[in-house]
Amino acid sequence: MVGAIQFIMGTFRLGSLVNYVSHAVIVGFTAGAGIIIAMGQLNNLLGVKLPDGHLSSIGKVIACFENIGTTNLVALGLGLFTIAVILLCRRINKNLPGALLGIIFSVMLVMLFDLEKYGLKMAGDIPQAIPPLSMPNFSLSAITDLASGSIVIAIIGLVEAVAISKAIASRTLQKLIRIRSSLDKV
């Protein structure tokens, strides 16, 4: 549904509406998304088990602090090691893939020292076969349930693409141009 909405937005040239969104809003949106992602991953960094059920990002943070005594020090150490590798790679050379190297080194540590026995959550067995193809559910109830979320995700994707384009253009001192199509003449 997100792809269809983005296709419709592109067909009707609605991407230019993003030009009316200020730079401060885009920066705020991007920073807010980063904070929400970090809050949602705090329990994984600390190795704290959250209660069952859906929790908001703030609920996850509160639950982490309520259960701070059950922090898995091995998980915390591994998470801090990964963050240190990422920061060190940035300091050495900005072109190094720090996140990828951090994950690779962390996986190597887990395998080398058999850290799974200390309560680290592992991915488990990965299926070797490709899942069978199936038709998606095109019922009216499913479409109405997913419509609002799909519109939001489509708009966020558009704003994100424009934000990235503007950031790259400002760093490289280039100007963003509008690509014209044969639809502009109609």
Image (spheres, rainbow, N blue to C red):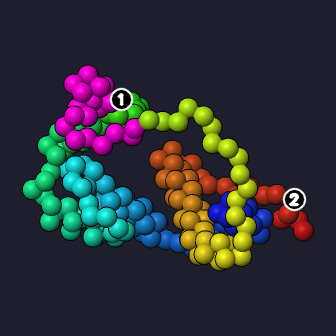
Q: Residue furthest left?
A: 69
- The single residue placed furthest to the right in the displayed view is 186
Secondary element under disc 2, as helix, strand or loop, is helix
Q: Is residue 118 left or right of residue 56?
A: left
**Compared with residue 63, is residue 127 higher up or lower down, i.e. above or below?**
above
Residue lying at the far top of the rendered structure: 112
Q: Looking at the image, which residue is at 61% across and 65% down?
A: 154
Q: Quadrant of residue 159?
A: bottom right
Amino acid type, residue under disc 1 in the picture: Ile
Q: Earlier in the sequence, mark 1 or mark 2?
A: 1
Residue 182 pos. (x, y %): 87, 59
Q: Give the secondary structure at mark 1.
A: helix
Query: Is residue 107 a member of the stretch shown in magenta?
Result: yes
Distance Cα–Cα, label 1 vs label 2: 47 Å
Judge whether residue 18 can be spotted in this image. no
Quadrant position of residue 37:
bottom left
Label 1 neighbourhood size at 10 Å, few (<14), some (14-19), many (20+)? few
Does residue 136 appear in the picture of this structure? Answer: yes
What amino acid is labelled 2 in the image?
Answer: Ser
Residue topped by disc 1: 104
User: Is residue 147 highlighted in magenta?
Assistant: no
Give the residues in magenta. Answer: 105-124
Q: Residue at x 90, y 68 (%)?
A: 186
Q: Which residue is mark 2?
A: 182
